[in-house]
Amino acid sequence: MRKSMMLLGAMVGLVASASGCQAPESTETTEDVSAAREAVVALPKKTIALSTGIQMAYLEMGDPAGDPVIFLHGYTDTSRSFYPTVTALAAMNHHLRIFVLDQRGHGASSMPPAAACAAAPGDCFEPADLASDVLAFMDAKGLCHADVVGHSMGSFVAQEVALEHPERVNSLVLIGTAAKLAGNIVLQDFILTEPVEGSWKNGFLAQGYSFPTDVYNLTPLDANADAITWISQAWVVDPAADPAFLADILPETAGTRMGTWIGAAHALLTTDNTQRLKQLEVPALVLWATEDGIFYDTDQQELRASLDVAVSHCKTEYYFKQYGKRPLSPDGLQLDDVGHNLQWGAPNEVAKDVNNYLRHGRPTKDWYYSADGNPQQIVTQKNAAPIIHPKPPKHCKK
């Protein structure tokens, strides 16, 4: 099925190219950002003006004539989140043209205009808004279609692009994902309620700002000097990740504007694709870790139930692969295995699975998890990965 869908995507691409899909890139520049934001790598970000009004920053690497792959980061993250993964992927596969985007309001990309968004930021950070930026980016770069890889918030943006414009997406890779964020306790209670609309909001109010309108383009550090403590100790943390890498990406997250913290959280908390994913027409790979503290095993069951309907209706096929072997702690914390940010803790292994999926339409069969007593050491157990791959009904066309 995946091969037939890829062929259809290629045919659509040929038609689109003939009608002017290869757009000029005259609006593209190279962005000079601060040393702190460039600390992870020397590769500079580029920027491009989008038809949505966003000045989008992004990283690009690989073969300029290669098959395009677009990576979409998570909430308050940036393109740097994927850098270890995409550098590994580019070394494995020299036939790819890799783009890693800073989504609107994140990293070096612009905020949507305060005049339209500051009073109700959630209205400007819905997955549909971010998906429109992705499509505008593809148009600006002359990409008729691409494979799309999304993590967490980025996985919901990827879902949105594929659900609304399946002809533009060859395949999906969804990392740390679910069918919905509506009602997610972690995002609601442990991020939005406190600290975003708790101590940070109070810090701004104490200074005489109205919330959220006056703080739209400010950062958490403007509210409370202790914000960096929460961000570094409760948010940009992962026991499986290299501490030096986390220290490098911390400044960009700390510099994320309050409009993004507020707006994206509110928008995501209304997002529910449970029914829509039953109509998904794009093949997908889902990568999930047992110590994911945002999306639990029950969320994965719900996601697979939706995708199973799409498979039964001959619309798609998918692989679900588990990383890790230990459960979350009783209080829901990631302690000793890979977790929600798989691309932080196991970047090379994620690259292997993405590469195998792009080449062969399936992930590797190897099981990846943290070593006993050392979560930063990733163990490979050959041909043992817990993988779910529901077979399409016999009447489905191959």
Image (cartoon, rainbow, N blue to C red):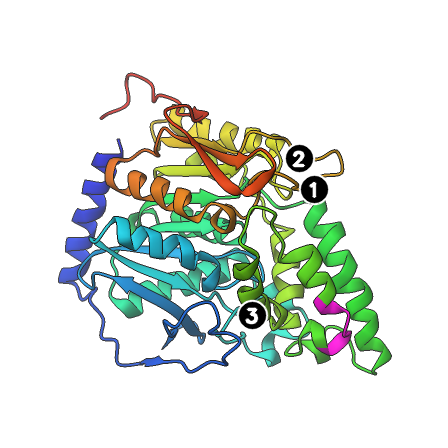
Which amino acid type is shown beneath numbered disc 1? Leu
Which amino acid type is shown beneath numbered disc 2? Leu
Image coords of residue 350 (percent x, y): 41, 44
Q: Residue beneath label 2, please?
A: 328
Query: Going by the image, does 315 lie left or right of 360?
Result: right
Task: Give the residue at x 41% y 23%.
Answer: 384
Q: Which of marks 3 and 1 is nearer the N terminus?
A: 3
Image coords of residue 87 (percent x, y): 34, 57
In the foreground, 390 or 365: 365
Q: Residue beneath label 3, please?
A: 252
Query: Going by the image, does 228 lie left or right of 125?
Result: right
Q: Which of marks 3 and 2 is nearer the N terminus?
A: 3
Q: Residue beneath label 1, please?
A: 333
In the foreground, 234 or 195: 234
Q: Where does the magenta region start and end?
A: 222-228
Q: Does the magenta stretch include residue 185?
A: no
Structural crowding at the residue carrying mark 3, measured as other residues with C-alpha within 10 Å and reported as few (<14), some (14–19) or many (≥20): many
**Contact, mark 2 vs mark 1 (Cβ under 8 Å):** yes
Image coords of residue 175 (percent x, y): 48, 44
Q: Can residue 204 be seen in this view?
A: yes
Structural crowding at the residue carrying mark 2, measured as other residues with C-alpha within 10 Å and reported as few (<14), some (14–19) or many (≥20): some
Which amino acid type is shown beneath numbered disc 3? Glu
- Look at the picture and state if 23 lies above or below 327: below
